[in-house]
Image (cartoon, rainbow, N blue to C red):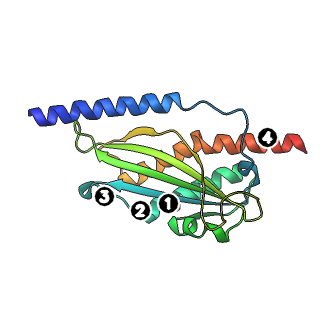
Amino acid sequence: MNEVTARYSRRLKNVLIAMMLVAGASTSQATTLPFEYGAFRSVCASVEISTDPQVEQGFARATISENVARTIQERLRALGLTYPVVAGPACLRERATAPQQLGLLFYARVVSDPEHPRRLIVSLIMHSFYNDPKSPGPYPTDIPKAQHEFPTDVSFCSAEADPSRCLTERVTEYFDATMLKIIERAQELLKGRQ
């Protein structure tokens, strides 16, 4: 291993450790939940992937968003919620026309692991948006407001795994660990008020 590669590897390890510490420190749960997690009537889910050209060819971008949306819909149905879940970036751009829509935008940065070139490192974060033209607020309905930003998750895809399938699994695991728990809690609180 030459000196440049060794320096890059040490720097990447330090960045990954820092990201894991930040993610661990920011996973505390709030005592109150924003109302939109109980008031939404549809979901828009989109996965944006940032990667190097040599890694990018392994991803079927549209399929990933569709599979994530399908899995989210299955999770919601398991909670008794039969709301539609739409996939892809188009629904986020048109969120002003979809009232009471919860938008979930997943950003994935995927790079090759310098120590194991065929293995991939996945850094993942989610932003949620909510649109309700009837709700008062300082934001115009055609300009979306990022409601919440969630902690960064860092994981790996093995060299043997299909990159698209692995990324889909990482995104759905991330959804299960963050947003699904919040939606479950919001539903419990709503049922307690009735």
Name which residue lies at 67% across and 41% down: 182
Between marks 3 and 4, how big is the CA–CA gap?
41 Å
Between marks 1 and 3, how big is the CA–CA gap?
15 Å
User: Are the residues tagged 4 and 1 within 8 Å (C-beta)?
Assistant: no
User: Are the residues tagged 3 and 4 within 8 Å (C-beta)?
Assistant: no
User: Are the residues tagged 2 and 3 within 8 Å (C-beta)?
Assistant: no
User: Are the residues tagged 1 and 2 within 8 Å (C-beta)?
Assistant: yes
Nearer to us in this view, 34 or 143:
143
Residue under label 4: 188
> From this viewpoint, which residue is outermost toward the front?
138
Q: Which amino acid does label 1 sit on?
A: Ser
Q: What residue type is labelled 2?
A: Arg
Between marks 4 and 2, how big is the CA–CA gap?
34 Å
Q: Badge 4 local density, few (<14 within 10 Å), some, or many (20+)?
A: few
Number of the label disc, if any, that sits on residue 56: 3
Number of the label disc, if any, that sits on residue 65: 1
What SS does tag 1 mark?
helix
Whole-percent x, y for residue 80 in the image: 76, 52
Residue under label 2: 61
Q: Badge 3 local density, few (<14 within 10 Å), some, or many (20+)?
A: some
> From this viewpoint, which residue is outermost toward the right?
194
Q: What residue type is labelled 3?
A: Glu
What SS does tag 2 mark?
helix
